[in-house]
Structures are given as structure tokens and as C-alpha cells.
Amino acid sequence: MDGDDVATRITITFEEAAFGCKKEVSFARIEACPDCGATGAAKGTKPETCSVCHGTGRVTVQQQTMLGYMQSQRACSACRGTGKIVKTPCKNCNGKGYIKVNKKLEVNIPAGIDSMQRIILRREGSAGRNGGANGDLIIEVQVKPHSLFERDGNTLYCDIPITFAEAALGAEINVPVLSPDKAKATEKYTIPEGTQTGTRFTLRGKGIQDINTKRRGDLIFTVVVDTPQNLNAEQKNLLRSFASSLGETNNRKTGAFFKKFFNR
């Protein structure tokens, strides 16, 4: 009979999920008792053949029904289906032949893994019985959220504040990107003049690496105009002068909005 699968969970950072890492996982699994070699018998003794089932682990049961006598087989209750009787049980495993052992294992976390995805390590689970194979170790991954980026598949999203002057005149801004090298954690990007708040821009190939194809997704950032606050008197007067100089060609959306409102 094959051994049971063992499940455990590991939590990693956003960057570790993006670029991959090595992590030590702790888990408990069932192993053959080292003292008795999974026989369940104390040292110097051996299990004896069950006298009820004669070592088969199965017994035939005959029952009378309306159609006559019916025969069926079931696990032997005397030896619990093992075919062996342990008269002097092993003290280490109490005659069970197997014990629970706490284990630690270093695991490679592949780049691009996401929350709720699983890593399966074959034959690292609990021991099989009567020649059966070991079960698997199933590791469920949890990824901590990032303070700046949000992820959807292999695409990254973030909001970037820009000044009123940068939005109106256009500017070259620094866009944060995920990189294992802190010296390369920003990319230059030129936004055009007249950029509105909420406008999205895309940096190709700056997202998360696909766990299978190794291709990187995109980074989509949204600019948010940071309205100035705590203006002094001079700044307010300059802004009023600037506002009075604007016409419909400068604020097209505002003019179009009120035209729709008054002409409906």
C-alpha cells in the first residue's frame, strides 16, 4: 500500500516569488521504525504468522441470505490484515512498525510562482507499507503582498504620483520596477505633455517571469496627478493668473462636459 501524501505550507516574499529562491520547509511524515525495521517486533524477536488467516491477512466469511449462502472476504481481525502477530512489541513504535518523524528539507522555489500554487516533491511523503511507494510532499505557497506592486498573473500594476507641472508639460520620470539588483530598480519613462490623471502606460517585459515559458509579463503603471497643497499667497495668485489665461483649447474635457450639460 502506498504511503500518504503530506501537505505543508510556506510563506515567501513578493520578490522571492518573482525571482525564485531556496527555502527550508518543516513537515512531519510517517517513517518505518528504525529499531524494528517496520516489523513492530522488539529486537531479537520476529512477528509470527497469524494462525487465523495463515498469513494471508484475509478471512472468508459465510453468510446465509434469502438466496442461499454467500461468501465474502474481509481483513483478518486477529492480525488486522497484516498476516502477522506481534507477541513482543517494539518499544520505540509500540508495535506499530512506523513512527512520526519531524523533517526539514531545502526546496527550490521557481521564479514566477504565485499564491495558492503548489510544489510537489515525489516520494517525500509518508512511507508505504508492504512494498508500497512513499507518498508525495505537497507544498502550498503563500506570497506576501507588496507595498507598491499588485499582481495579476504575470502582469504587474502600480500607481505613480506626478506633479501638476509634469502632467501639463510632460516629463521624464523614474518608474519603479522589480529587479534583484537595487541599482536597476527604476526605469526612465517619458510621459507626454497634457497627460491626464489615471492615464496608463506600459513597460514591456518588466512584469513577472512565467513559471513555464520563462517569458516576462508587462508592468502597467497609472499616473496620478498630485494636486499641490498648503500654497502660500504668492503661489495662489500665480495659479489664479494661470487659470484665467486658460481657454477651451486648454481644458477640452471641462468645456465639453458643460456643453453637454447645458445643451441637453
Image (cartoon, helix red, strand yellow):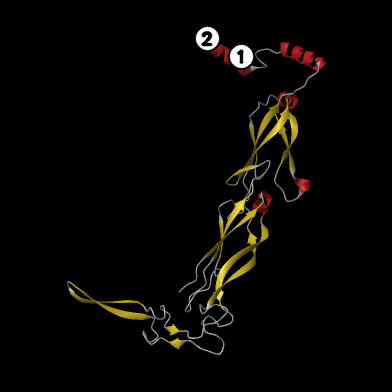
User: Total label count?
Assistant: 2
Name above or below for residue 220 compared with residue 117.
Answer: above
**Mark 1: secondary structure:** helix
Of the pair 31 and 110, the residue shown nearer to us: 31
10 Å neighbourhood of mark 1: few (<14), some, or many (≥20)? few
Name above or below for residue 208 compared with residue 36.
Answer: above
Q: Which residue is mark 2?
A: 263
| Residue at x 64% of width, y 67% of height | 104
Of the pair 228 and 209, the residue shown nearer to us: 228
Q: Mark on residue 255?
A: 1
Q: Amino acid at mark 2?
A: Asn
**Mark 2: secondary structure:** loop
Left or right for 247, reference 34: right
Of the pair 112 and 133, the residue shown nearer to us: 133
Farthest residue to the bottom: give it. Answer: 44
10 Å neighbourhood of mark 2: few (<14), some, or many (≥20)? few
Q: Are marks 1 and 2 in contact (CB under 8 Å)?
A: no
The numbered mark, 1 or 2, whose residue comes first in the sequence reads: 1
Left or right for 153, reference 167: left
> What is the x, y in percent for residue 54?
37, 87
> What is the x, y in percent for residue 22?
67, 60
